[in-house]
Image (cartoon, helix red, strand yellow):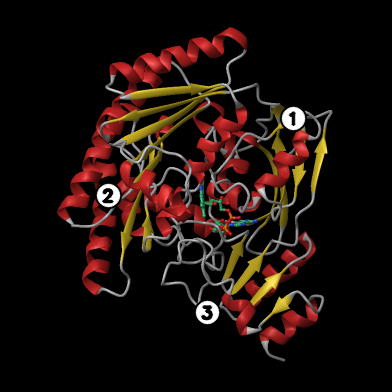
Amino acid sequence: MDALTELREALPESVVVTDPDVVEGYRFDWSRDPNAGTPLAVVRVEDAGQVQATVRWAARHGVPVVPRGAGSGLSGGSGAVDGGIVLSLERMSTVEIDTECQVAVVEPGAFNRDVKVAAAEHGLWYPPDPSSYEICSIGGNIATNAGGLCCVKYGVTTDYVLGLDVVLADGTLVTLGGKRIKDVAGLSLLKLFVGSEGTLGIVTRAILRLVPAQSARSTMVATFPDVDAAARAVVAVRRELRPSMLELMDQASINAVEDFRTMGLDRTAGALLLAQSDAPAGARGEEVATMQAACTASGATDVFVTDDPDEGEMFVEARRQAFPAIGARGTLMLEDVGAPIPLLPDLLAAITAIAVEHDIEIPVVAHAGDGNTHPIIVFDEKDPDSTQRAAEAFAAVMAAAIKLGGTITGEHGVGTTKKSALPDQLGPDVMELTRRVKTALDPDGILNPGTIL
Ligand SMILES: Cc1cc2nc3c(=O)[nH]c(=O)nc-3n(C[C@H](O)[C@H](O)[C@H](O)COP(=O)(O)OP(=O)(O)OC[C@H]3O[C@@H](n4cnc5c(N)ncnc54)[C@H](O)[C@@H]3O)c2cc1C
């Protein structure tokens, strides 16, 4: 019996899919890394037992396993590997709310939005909010330690993970953490799996901390003559307070969004900042006034404030449209570089200089309040010269971030697309430690090979 037949016989009929048309839909993530391979099969598991059976089979036959949530990743991490299987968690999507413990017990295929909606029904809130919250899974969020727009005040995914069930590379299922708010028993293994990009284990269940529903928000939109002035305003705002949102769009991304879908943004602005405050009662007005003053002092040409939630949401939606809008302009190489907040103006200046030097378009949006930027390199994949210049610019942007004491990735993960720069950021000792952890947990290297390392 060949290996695939053995897998089919171990699982219910509809779980293992080899139809090339269906398999094609699981080869790439949103980044469409051209190096993605062609898998033997897609395994659409229905429960943790099937995950264990699949991983045990893979371990016996030395078959690579690429865990996959919703495939919205931007670093190639859920791209398929030649001769491997894609282990899709999409069918495992239950969400249960425990109101007494204020946690959500969630299967990995549930979308981020599903958790928010279920929590809201009980007056609770799951804060992490990637722009992709309607199209990304909790398993993917945990595996990438996803950030988002309100993370500047409320933290990122790892800050909300209290417990995980994880299937290890030999098929063992371990339960880490639980519904306990505080728990320091043993090594902090729970957090080792958050952000491990499917290379150390497969998350089959998560216990997520919920908080009381967010208070009413005021929204501020400030326009600037250029990106530098906007970045300096970010530094000034962050010196004073932590707003619940502080996003930046440069002129190219504003215009890409307006071309894609008319949202009423000021096309003439050199850059805009989108900020929100959800501070209680009078403190909200004070926070907005402080942010207004910081923007004006940094050279804002216009500052608009609204307490209308629908109007505020319209601007946030415009920001969320940035990736698809810029994607309509050509093929993309997506960066996720960050720097310490005071160096945000330097990072953005370096990106502008790289765009000029390599004669390539690099619109920028940023979770600016976190110092996390998304320079998006737009190129023509049919033109080898354009592709070459884009690749050089991609490497140069990561190098610039490292030089500033920043990071090559703030929230999307290293995946396959950024791993060449990882040694430059981490150095040989930390790379070696990373390899030792990987080897200890996955000695045969079957879990998501080619990602991170
Ligand atoms: C328009 C757009 C906007 C975005 N905005 C943001 C943003 O604001 N912030 C942000 O952080 N990201 C953002 N992203 C990126 C992406 O949505 C996140 O990285 C998200 O966490 C990926 O979830 P997914 O379910 O799509 O994961 P996938 O793409 O399927 O997988 C991502 C990684 O997680 C691993 N993985 C998936 N499920 C599991 C599991 N159960 N166990 C172990 N490993 C697993 C995969 O192997 C892969 O390495 C955006 C993407 C798009 C397309």
| Mark 1 closeness class: few <14, some 14–19, many ≥20 residues within 10 Å | many
**Residue 44 in the image: above or below residue 397:** below
Between discs 1 and 3, the one toward the N terminus: 3
**Residue 235 in the image: above or below residue 330:** above
- Cα–Cα gap, marks 1 and 2: 39 Å
- Cα–Cα gap, marks 2 and 3: 30 Å
Between discs 2 and 3, the one toward the N terminus: 3
Confirm if mark 1 falls within 8 A of ligand 1: no
Identified by mark 3, the residue type is Thr
- The residue lying furthest to the bottom in this view is 1
From the viewer's perspective, is 64 left or right of 294? right
Identified by mark 1, the residue type is Leu
**Label 3 belongs to which residue?**
38
**Label 1 belongs to which residue?**
124
Residue 62 seen in the current view: no
Residue 338 position within the rendered picture, expressed as x and y whole percent measured from the top left = 36, 40
**Label 2 belongs to which residue?**
397
